[in-house]
Image (cartoon, rainbow, N blue to C red):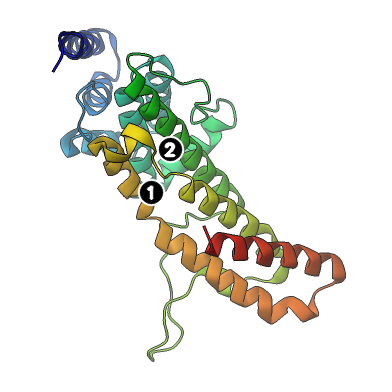
């Protein structure tokens, strides 16, 4: 490790210690603030589960809405202020874990918050500490776009694709299917483009350069890839449903369906 890298590591640790001390002294939500700082510190490793559990508990249905709103505000503030790719990526991981493992209250409050403040659109984020950090920064921006698209998809579908339990028809050996298999034509034409756009964002999360071999990036990428199965299932079931309904559609709806088929064909080859 070079002297410059050692200095940056020590400086990051000092900033984390200072931030924890300030949160302990000044915050009305000191336990939550301390957990957020510790979960998103400058150490290049995934957030620890014990800190994540405290954040999940603070955003649960058992807590007042104001507490959930403060949790989101604190995460947004952490993300907006940092210029460290490590802190930014770990904050996005915390948000992603809360979306996956937390209760619906967090997702609903985050939807309301992002209508006012686009915290996940990190187009201007860049860690200038080293050329390698530029590769990491690029992936942080891409990851933020995926999470933003995930929220947009939920806004249209009105349910979380990852939390969906795939029902089975009857008691035989039929495979589980997604809600898109049962939708009417209008709901299909509205939901399928949103699902396909989410899949584009997921495919676009391939890391490049130094980010391709970084452990922290790979950890976050694994969270993204875990969502691919249900997205693919929802799209495939929706395509089957569209085929069944295609010849009954009015012409303008049939043209929309053809565009969905075209995009589906393109995505198969990506």
| Residue labelled with disc 1 | 224
Question: In the image, what residue occupies the spot 59% across and 70% down?
Answer: 238
Residue 231: percent from left, percent from top: 48, 60
Q: Nearer the viewer, residue 167 or 197?
A: 197
Question: In the image, what residue occupies the spot 51% across and 56% down?
Answer: 159
Q: Is residue 174 left or right of residue 197?
A: left
Q: Nearer the viewer, residue 122 or 2?
A: 2
Q: Is residue 182 visible?
A: no
Q: Which label sits on residue 90?
A: none
Q: Earlier in the sequence, mark 1 or mark 2?
A: 2
Please, what secondary structure does the residue beneath circle 1 have? helix
Identify the image quadrant of residue 116: top right
Residue 195: percent from left, percent from top: 57, 56
Please, what secondary structure does the residue beneath circle 2 have? helix
Number of dots carrying numbers: 2
Give the spatial CA distance, label 1 vs label 2: 9 Å
**Up/down of 129 relative to 103, above or below:** above
Identify the image quadrant of residue 69: top left
- The answer to whether marks 1 and 2 mark residues whose Cβ atoms lie closer than 8 Å is yes
Residue 14: percent from left, percent from top: 18, 8
Q: Is residue 41 left or right of residue 197?
A: left
**CA neighbours of label 2 inside 10 A, class few (<14), some (14 to 19), many (20+):** many
Residue 15: percent from left, percent from top: 23, 10
Q: Is residue 121 visible?
A: yes
Q: Is residue 166 left or right of residue 16?
A: right
Q: Which label sits on residue 143?
A: 2
**Up/down of 53 relative to 192, above or below:** above
Q: Residue furthest bottom?
A: 172
**Up/down of 198 relative to 48, above or below:** below
């Amino acid at each position: 490790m070079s002297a410059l890298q050692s200095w940056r590591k020590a400086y990051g640790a000092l900033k984390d210690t200072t931030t924890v001390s300030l949160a302990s002294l000044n915050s009305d939500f000191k336990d939550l603030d301390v957990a957020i700082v510790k979960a998103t510190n400058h150490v290049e490793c995934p957030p620890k589960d014990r800190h994540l559990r405290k954040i999940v508990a603070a955003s649960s249905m058992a807590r007042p809405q104001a507490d959930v709103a403060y949790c989101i505000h604190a995460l947004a503030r952490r993300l907006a202020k940092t210029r460290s790719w490590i802190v930014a990526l770990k904050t996005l991981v915390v948000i992603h874990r809360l979306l996956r493992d937390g209760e619906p209250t967090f997702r609903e409050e985050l939807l309301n918050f992002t209508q006012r403040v686009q915290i996940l659109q990190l187009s201007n984020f860049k860690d200038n500490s080293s050329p390698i950090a530029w590769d990491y920064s690029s992936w942080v921006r891409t990851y933020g776009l995926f999470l933003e698209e995930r929220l947009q998809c939920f806004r249209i579908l009105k349910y979380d694709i990852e939390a969906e339990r795939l029902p089975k028809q009857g008691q035989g050996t039929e495979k589980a299917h997604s809600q898109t298999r049962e939708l009417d034509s209008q709901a299909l034409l509205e939901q399928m483009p949103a699902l396909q756009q989410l899949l584009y964002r997921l495919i676009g999360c391939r890391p490049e350069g130094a980010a391709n071999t970084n452990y922290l990036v790979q950890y976050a990428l694994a969270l993204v890839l875990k969502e691919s199965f249900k997205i693919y299932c929802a799209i495939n079931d929706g395509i089957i449903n569209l085929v069944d309904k295609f010849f009954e559609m009015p012409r303008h709806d049939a043209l929309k369906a053809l565009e969905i088929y075209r995009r589906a064909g393109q995505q198969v080859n990506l």
